[in-house]
Image: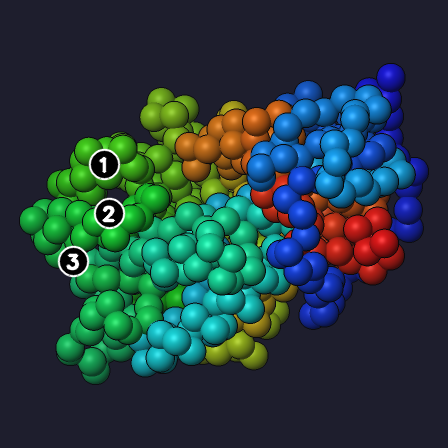
Amino acid sequence: AGAGRRPAAAPPPAHRIPHTAPAAVPRSTPLSLLLRNALLLDVESGTYQECDVRCADGRIAETGSRLAAPDGVRVVDLAGAPVLPGLIDAHVHVTAATADLGALPHSSPSYIAAHSARIMGGMLDRGFTTVRDASGADYGLSDAQAEGLVRGPRLLFCGRALSQTGGHGDTRGRGTRVSDDHPCCAGLGRVADGVDAVRAAARDELRKGAHHLKVMASGGVASPTDRIDSTQYSMDELRAIVEEATAANRYVAAHAYTARAVNRALEAGIRSIEHGNLLDDESVRLFAHHDAFLVPTLVTYWALKKEGPEYGLPADSHRKVDEVLGEGLAALERAVRGGVRTVYGSDLLGGMHHHQNEEFRLRAEVQSPLDVIRSATTTAARLLCREGEIGTTAPGAYADLIVLRGDPLTDIGFLADPRNVAGVVQGGTVVTAGAQSPFAA
């Protein structure tokens, strides 16, 4: 009866996202949960249903009107608040405690892990219940989160990104000769040159449990010695990496900015293009032909321009930001117009992680609120090969849910400012309860 109903509007949120996070709820909260009077969003249809939601054993057990509450189930009345699937950010760096990526290999892994735990906790409080790490995180952080040792989103990782010598994953300055890729050192990339070497590196990351592989296929902002407009890795090397991922039933994501770099990566069989700020019409055609995904990361350039130096971004890298900042929105508009499947990504570094939700506001300049929400739920789940498990409120999926203070379909600001997140449920457990949240009672 409540299908299509919209919640009452609330005053628009302040633009600035605060550093303070909602209070955490201990993980001892019961795993069986019944949410009464939810306004549940079906992301595919874009309509709301007024219903109850019962969670059991970490999954959504059923939805419907006036569901029975079995003994021992915690019951929470949401009083008509909008409920969405837990959000998915498909491009994060949870180990990026600083924007000076070259400094990470000189840091203690235990020190970086402590920062990562803090960063991941903040992501969870902002409504992100699953994230895909785009280099830096490993099986240790993923296992720690799964076991409840680290509070944060479900973590899909690639380990170290593969980079050619002098590529985007090579953090050495011009005066440094020796590269130390030992796994005891923190860092985002590993250098491998030649078909045999990239095969061995890909197999090594897969051996350690990588959910996907990441390859640097063009220059980047945060790397010290390459040009943004360069292409990186030969086609033979790119194809070898894709072959290794395919053999292990995994896929490859590629960092790429220019149309030339994007198109080479797509032709090599890469599944997702990260950034793609300078793509062209041929890129759009190739995305469709190869059934690939685009993961724009507009907010990171916005944040790097505004705050990068404050959080460690070297001056040379800060000067590169302008080369991609203005083109990102135009590239997204071109891709959307051409039917490319776009996925939510933030790519924030250092103290800029708290801007994670601002990507919703930036994308809404060229996409409808519903399409932006899909990019962080159902479309992201397809990219991550987790359809039906995450990014949906259908029975059988993980019970990952966020409760909002207003309707994001009428005002995307209710997602762009995490102060509007009234509560977060992850795997059927209440993990975050904001001020005056229905979960705080």
Compared to residue 187, the image places residue 269 above or below, namely above
Residue topped by disc 1: 248
Q: Residues within 10 Å of mark 3 (few under 14, many from 20)?
A: many
Q: CA distance from mark 2 to mark 1?
A: 8 Å
Q: Which residue type does callout 1 highlight? A: Ala
Q: Are marks 3 and 2 in contact (CB under 8 Å)?
A: no
Q: CA distance from mark 3 to mark 2?
A: 15 Å
Residue topped by disc 3: 192
Q: Quadrant of the C terminus?
A: bottom right
Identity of the residue drawn at 69% across and 70% down:
19
Q: Are marks 2 and 1 in contact (CB under 8 Å)?
A: yes
Q: Quadrant of the N terminus?
A: top right
Q: Which residue type does callout 2 highlight? A: Leu
Residue topped by disc 2: 206
Q: Which of the two labelled residues, at mark 3 and mark 2, occupies the earlier sequence position?
A: 3
Compared to residue 186, the image places residue 335 above or below, namely above
Foreground pick, 416 / 34: 34
Q: Which of the two labelled residues, at mark 1 and mark 3, occupies the earlier sequence position?
A: 3
User: How many badges with numbers are in the image?
Assistant: 3
Compared to residue 134, the image places residue 330 above or below, namely above
Q: Are marks 1 and 3 in contact (CB under 8 Å)?
A: no
Residue 386's mark?
none
Residue 265 visible in the shown view = yes
Give the SS element for disc 1. Answer: loop
Give the SS element for disc 2. Answer: helix
Q: Which residue type does callout 3 highlight? A: Ala
